[in-house]
Structures are given as C-alpha cells and as structure tokens.
Image (cartoon, grey):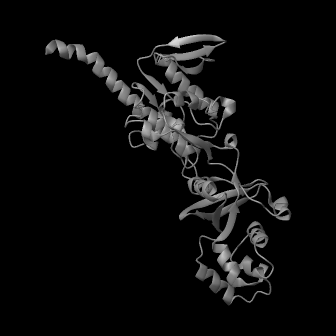
Amino acid sequence: IRSFTNQDLQNWLNAIGIETYVGSSKRIFPVKEIKPIHVLNAILDQLKNRGVEFKMKHEWKGWNNKNELLFENDSNELIVKADVVAFALGGASWCKTGSDGTWIDYFKVKNIEIIPFQASNCAYQIDWKKNFISGYEGQPLKNISLRCNGKEKKGEVVLTQFGIEGGAVYALSAEIRKQLNEIGKATIFIDLKPTLTLNEIDQKFASNTYRTISKALDSIKLNKLQIALLKSFLTKENFTDTKTISKNIKQLPIQLIGMAPIDEAISTVGGISLRETDQYFQLKKLPDHYAIGEMLDWDAPTGGYLLQACFSMGNFLGKKLNHDATDDIMQPSLNALS
C-alpha cells in the first residue's frame, strides 16, 4: 500500500479525468455526476491506448500438462503459452459478474493451499422481536460505537428484518466471524452514547427530577429508535432501573446468530493462502505465475479499503514486472560488454 497510496490513487484518477472528493466518512469518492461506468470506461480507455488487448467471453479452464493456459470460447478450446501470468480473479461474492470463486479448483490441482471462502463486510443475523423490527426496519442507528472482542468502531448501522448492516459492523467482520465459527454465535456491544461516560449518564439520571424514564432518556438526547431498542432487550423491571439502563446505554449486548449468504457480501475472505506466494505475489509452486487482489486470503474493512489495496497490489506487481522486462532487454548488451 505504501508503494501506491490513496493519494497516488487520487492523483491517477484525476489524471485520467475522474475528479474525486473526500466524503464525511473520510473515504474517497468520484464527484457525484461521475457514475461507476464512467470510472470503468476511463480505466479501459487508458489500457486500450497502451495497447492492451481484451479477449471477451473467454473462460479460463486451468492448465494442460505443460502448464499452458486453457481457455474456452463458444465451445472452442484455446491454448495460450505465456511468459508471465498475472491472475486477478476476485473473490466469491459477485456471481452475476462472474466472480464466483470456482477458479479455486484449478489451483487445488496444483497442490496450492486454498482457504475456504467466507463472507466479509456483510449483514449479520439477529433474532429481533417482531413488534420491534416491524416498526423500525430500515432505520439507521447513527453516532454510535460498536465493540466486539476488544475492537471498537464508531459510525452507524442500519436495522433490517434480517439483522444489522453498515460500516460500523463491517469493520468488525473478522472478530464477529471468528466467534460465529467457534461457537455459532457472536456478541457485539452497542454504545448508544459514545460522547458521554457511564458516570456522566449516572449523574444526569441522579440529578434529574423527571417523572418518567422516557423523559429522563430524553434528557440525554436518546432518540425514539434508541429507546425502543433498549426496551426490546430489557425486561420491564430493568427498564425502570436507571443503573441498569445506564449500563446498557453504554454497552447493550446484541447476539448475532449468522451472517448473510456469501453472494450478498460486499467482499470475501479466503482464497489462496499467503503462504503460497513470495514477496512479489508469485506462486511458489508455479514460477512466473502471480496472484493479486481479493483472490488471496486477506481481509479488508469495507469495500473502499479493498479497492485501494487491490490497486496498490496491481501497481506493485506492475512495477516489478516492468523492472524484470527492462532487465531482460538490457541483458544482451551487458553480456556483449562483458
């Protein structure tokens, strides 16, 4: 990532006509009138202008016994012998685009270690009380903090019939997934008021003269959704005890019982084990074959970080291959001089 930073990516996008801005989340976006298809077309134009040739509707089918690449196009088989191969086959969460992860079988044949794909940056399932979620489905919990296994993330999430999704919970995917894999459930703790300490909330409740709990909660500016969420997880007795309410405002435990299907995830974790590649992403068991991007087993907190790291990997490998090619061109001259 240091070899091609987020600033480098911004500069490059601007150079090819894609103006960007930094959003409130501190993430980088194209300006609003620029659609994803415009970004894709600008990148494709750059590649075509540099002489890159695209072969559409060619499905890779692995290797033959000479390690030559096999392709299928309209039922016709093609064999390609390449000096260098760079794979960027993606993960397994966008089947409709062709990114279905089925390529792993070809690498298994070569005894390359594959870590099973799992969803990442996805929605997580909660067994909501029906009378609660029916009234608050689709609403966001804003300005909160989530914690799981010691990791904390501020932000917002959206409540759905299925459970919970959004940037704050995506950032905890690794911790949540670990618990789900180990014990079949995971617990996250929601801080509904990160700007106040537990002691400050207790003091506000102790000093107020409000006649009802709801009025007391209004005094610390909890909204209707936050209050309803507390009610749905607390007994009537606990909801009348300000000490219990204070504790749950700061760390309301929510149990997650599953994750969204892998094809509904923003990204996946799993793929080719990093133990199978060298420092340049070359496959140790297949010289001159490289693998980059989401097809490697690494995890990214949300899609923006995933994209940045994939761009960085591509730039890093491109520089390495360009350097190798330059060395090959220069080698005959060096030999002649020697």
In this rendering, does residue 11 appear at all? no
Q: Is residue 228 above or below residue 210?
A: above
User: In which image quadrant can residue 195 be found?
Assistant: bottom right
Q: Quadrant of the N terminus?
A: top left
Q: Residue at x 69, y 65 (%)?
A: 254
Question: Of 81 and 53, which appears nearest the observer?
Answer: 81
Q: Is residue 226 above or below residue 168?
A: below
Image side of residue 322 versus residue 39, left or right: left
In this rendering, does residue 125 appear at all? yes
Image side of residue 88 versus residue 244, left or right: left
Q: Position of residue 256 (x, y in %)?
A: 69, 59
Count the numbered circles shown: 0
Q: Position of residue 75 (x, y in %)?
A: 66, 12
Question: Of 23 and 313, which appears nearest the observer?
Answer: 313
Q: Position of residue 8 (x, y in %)?
A: 43, 39
Q: Residue at x 64, y 63 (%)?
A: 188
Q: Is residue 278 above or below residue 301?
A: above
Q: Residue at x 86, y 64 (%)?
A: 131
Image side of residue 138 versus residue 177, left or right: right
Q: Quadrant of the C terminus?
A: top left
Question: Of 274 and 137, which appears nearest the observer?
Answer: 274
User: In which image quadrant can residue 30 be found?
Assistant: top right
